[in-house]
Image (spheres, rainbow, N blue to C red):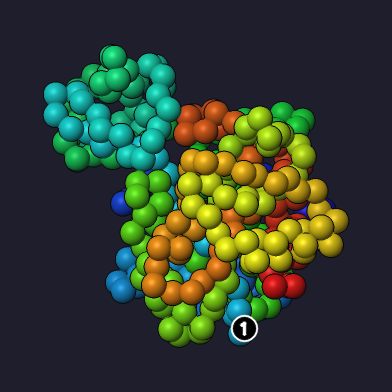
Amino acid sequence: MEPIDIELLKQLCGIFAPSGNESALTKYLIEYVETQQDNWKTKPELIYGEEFQDCLILKFGEPTTAIFAHLDSIGFTVRYENQLVPIGGPEVESGDLLVGHDAMGPIECKIKDEDGHLFYDFGRGIESGTDLVYKCDFRETEEYFQSCYIDNRLGVYNALKVAETLENGLIIFSCWEEHGGGTVSFLCKWMYEKYKVKQALISDITWITDGVTHGQGVVVSLRDSSIPRREYVDKIIALAEASGVPYQIEVERSGGSDGREIQQSQYPIDWCFVGAPEDYVHTPNELVHKADITAMVTLYKYLMNNL
């Protein structure tokens, strides 16, 4: 099973990249790939630029399957008179620490929730339009990691670990997932029309529920608010079974991922959500079991070699 690169995961969780403001993480990933790729089994082609906005694609060999991992996190935008507007769906508690930067300098402030109306508590006014995110407090115990933005920096981490041994495939880092999506449609167009790639895995994080628990393996989702094509999902489950990697089955009525946008695109692309489960979702204290991280990376490597 895969060892965990704690420092890489910690760095990823601390990078400022709320929905619509992902460029710092994109630049980090480009630099990371350029410095690490000589140690990988296959050097990828890096694809990015204005036509891809802040998205990044790594192309390995002759791809038949794509991994999608969204870069963005939930957060907040400063409005007027100390008001905050959520980015995505943060679960807020008064006193949570937020960080950011405006024209007057760095910001570290507390959030106040007054009957569902959000405000910041800071010693000066913050420039309207400034994005703020949870302050990263990365913690480790014998069995768990806990931090803000494990959703979806763990999905990004997983993709980077798979990249180390990948020979054929696409790794696609998307944007805006937490706030309605918007990039996956043109990414689907690009990968289908250029390479005829018709199958995808969604490298994202799901929830601990009554049917999904810590330490029991990576989750293969049969459905959330969207329903992937069952023939493809059954293929993923058969491969998961053959791999010997611990996994869990998820069935939910709500929630979503980049898979929703793939399904709504005009292209016949199959998808399946495969990811570790976490507790305290969309808070500064997201909690994931180390064994589930290891299972996620190990199963992805197996799937990408066998799909």
Q: Is residue 128 left or right of residue 266?
A: left
> Which residue shows up at 36% across the image and 33% down it?
99
Q: Nearer the viewer, residue 204 or 14?
A: 204
Q: Residue furthest front?
A: 230
Q: Is residue 144 left or right of residue 95?
A: right
Q: Is residue 238 left or right of residue 200?
A: right
Q: Which of the 4 image quadrants contains residue 26?
A: bottom left
Q: Which of 165 and 155 is in front in this view?
A: 155
Which three-letter amino acid code belongs to the residue tagged 1? Gly
> Which residue shows up at 63% across the image and 34% down it?
208
> Which residue shows up at 38% across the image and 36% down it?
89
Q: Which of 255 and 31 is in front in this view?
A: 255
Q: Callout 1: 10 Å neighbours few (<14), some, many (20+)?
A: some
Q: Can residue 20 be seen in this view?
A: yes
Q: Mark 1 points at which residue?
A: 61
Q: Which residue lies furthest to the left in this view?
A: 80
Q: In this view, does 96 lie to the left or right of 306?
A: left
Image quadrant occupied by the C terminus = bottom right
| Residue 238: x %, y % from top left | 77, 62
